[in-house]
Image: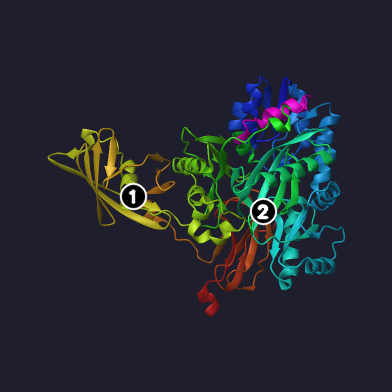
Amino acid sequence: MFDTILIANRGEIACRVMETAQSLGVRCVAVYSDADAQAKHVAMADMAVHIGGSAPAESYLRGDVIIQAALDSGAQAIHPGYGFLSENPDFVEAVEKAGLVFIGPSASAIRAMGLKDAAKALMIEAGVPVVPGYHGADQDDGLLAEEAAKIGYPVLIKAVAGGGGKGMRLVEAAGGFQAALESARSEAKTAFGNSDVLVEKFVAKPRHIEVQVFGDGNKAVHLFERDCSLQRRHQKVIEEAPAPGMTEEMRRAMGDAAVKAAEAIGYAGAGTVEFIVDGSDGLSADGFFFMEMNTRLQVEHPVTEAITGVDLVEWQLRVAAGESLPNAQEELKIDGHAFEARLYAEDVPAGFLPATGTLTHLQFTPQTRADSGVRAGDKISPFYDPMIAKVIVHGATRDVALAKLRAALAGCQVGGTVTNLAFLGALAGHVGFGKGDVDTGLIARDINSLTQVPAVEARHVALAGMAALGLLDGKAETGFTLWRPLRRAVTLARGEEIHALKVRVLGPDVQIWNVDDVEVRATRRGQGWTLGGQQAADVVLAAGVVTVFDGYGMAFEVVDPLDRASGAQGDGNLIEAPMPGLVRAVDAQVGQSVSKGDRLAVLEAMKMEHALLAARDGVVAEVLAVVGDQVEAGAALVRLEAEAEVAA
């Protein structure tokens, strides 16, 4: 076993690798950017090395600097985590040239699976079923359109170097092919530096089922399947293992195909073979097709660990250190069921817009495995993926595990930023999902019901008022003025909603609240309060914001009346940056007439591109940003002429 390893990553996965490595007595070296100087993974490490600026290109993508840090720190090996350099064959070769061990597959294996078209040709040769499609090198627009027609609509256009849904477009009919092709190529070029695409048949009721494989360079085993069908815009949201409705016959067929794929390229380490599955008439052994292979540890690996009892990071370290596979195929068994939900800092009502902010509070239920790279007090940075944690549960059956997931999400407490927690809770409670009737289109079909904002009741607002005025402890001296009840007032804001509150404190154990003309009685029994006859939720006040932990978290800003009276009103003609980011494109030109919904600019933040659209018809008066600008949240990018100006 290694004495010291360097982890060439950050956040949740860096912390996850350290937990196992340090438990084995292995010393861990972290690397960090300017933005991550105080990060959790830095605090956990035995040693930490600064490697550059906040942007990934200035730090976590600097392979030469990372390798030098490994050499200087005495590390014998580098663990890449996932993302960043984890699937970069040039980096693997540079690591090995420096005399270090890369904890993962060979450069040749990564190259073999790095381009989707070449990988599919290799899989066909290995006897692994693939989706009908065009994977050729000729990228002529006309040829691609002809091939799409031969395959039959609907089709998917995919970036050959793609991943994470980038460079992917669904085309329903021939008339939309050219526009989708141009869009996919543009996004692929930005994300991967390669605009080539492939075209595939779109499966009508697709399920995304993947198989965890592990190899030692000669032999491979599989650790069964995961269902990752709950996706939004090709991004996984909730994963589970094993797949609902899976038959033993199909499990054997998929497992055998995945092992063939791994052994065909001499795979070493943890990898995932992803399949698209036709779920239109149940699962059958002839209804799955190779999609791609991820030559790294997957984000969702904990559900496999939960049902097998295998620590995949430990296996990675042992095999990279020269051991053979720890278990034979017949020794691996499935025990129960597991779910993982990805908790993100994102504004769901605003279209799942990534969010930033300082985490003022972070707490999970004791029964939850929460893999996280942040703590209370940490900032969600605009430079990286806005994941807060992976919420993982395990139960004896799928129903038991799903009940545990619902409880874990309901008990999760996050303060200081908006999250997708309510969305995850709605998914966990979805009737179809509960029955195991899942496919990759479920979220899109039911998006309106899944993104409903939990209702705020008067008792929630009153509880926030109690925290804002310091009345939760109910001390006798705060309860009375001379000879009469104490009367106080406070104003709270939740988004655009303003709540005016008044309270009469009748004693240390009784308060009468008036919330927007609705009366709420707060009564303390023992150490706990009830409001409107219901037990009060946990509540936290930090940085002028009260978070009530009911309905997956409700945040109320404590409003200073003087600030509110003097506050400037926003200019409805401005198109502003919704978050800090890089201006990737500016489409607007001064004097241009635009229609509602026209794209005016593109902002890149948190590894995603966000189109900024015109909110109304109008004429562009000013363009206030240029491509390459790094802007803060709220920065004005484009101004439209006032409607009165246009009319004149």
Do tag 2 and tag 1 residues touch (Cβ < 8 Å)?
no
Most foreground residue, 512 or 213: 213
Q: Secondary structure at mark 1?
A: helix
Q: Secondary structure at mark 2?
A: loop
**Farthest residue toward the bottom?**
648
Is residue 475 toward the left or the right of residue 417 in the image? Answer: left
Q: Which residues are magenta?
A: 307-325
Residue 461: assigned label: 1
Residue 135 spot, x, y in % from top left: 83, 57
**Farthest residue toward the left?**
483
Q: Amino acid at mark 2?
A: Asp
Tell us which disc is closer to us: 2 or 1: 1
Most foreground residue, 506 or 101: 101
Q: What residue is pinned by disc 2?
A: 629
Is residue 317 toward the left or the right of residue 517 in the image? Answer: right
Residue drawn at x 84%, y 26% is 99
Q: Whole-Å distance between the Cαs marked 2 and 1? A: 41 Å
Say whether residue 273 is visible. Answer: no
Q: Is residue 572 magenta?
A: no
Residue 347 spot, x, y in % from top left: 52, 52
Q: Amino acid at mark 1?
A: Val
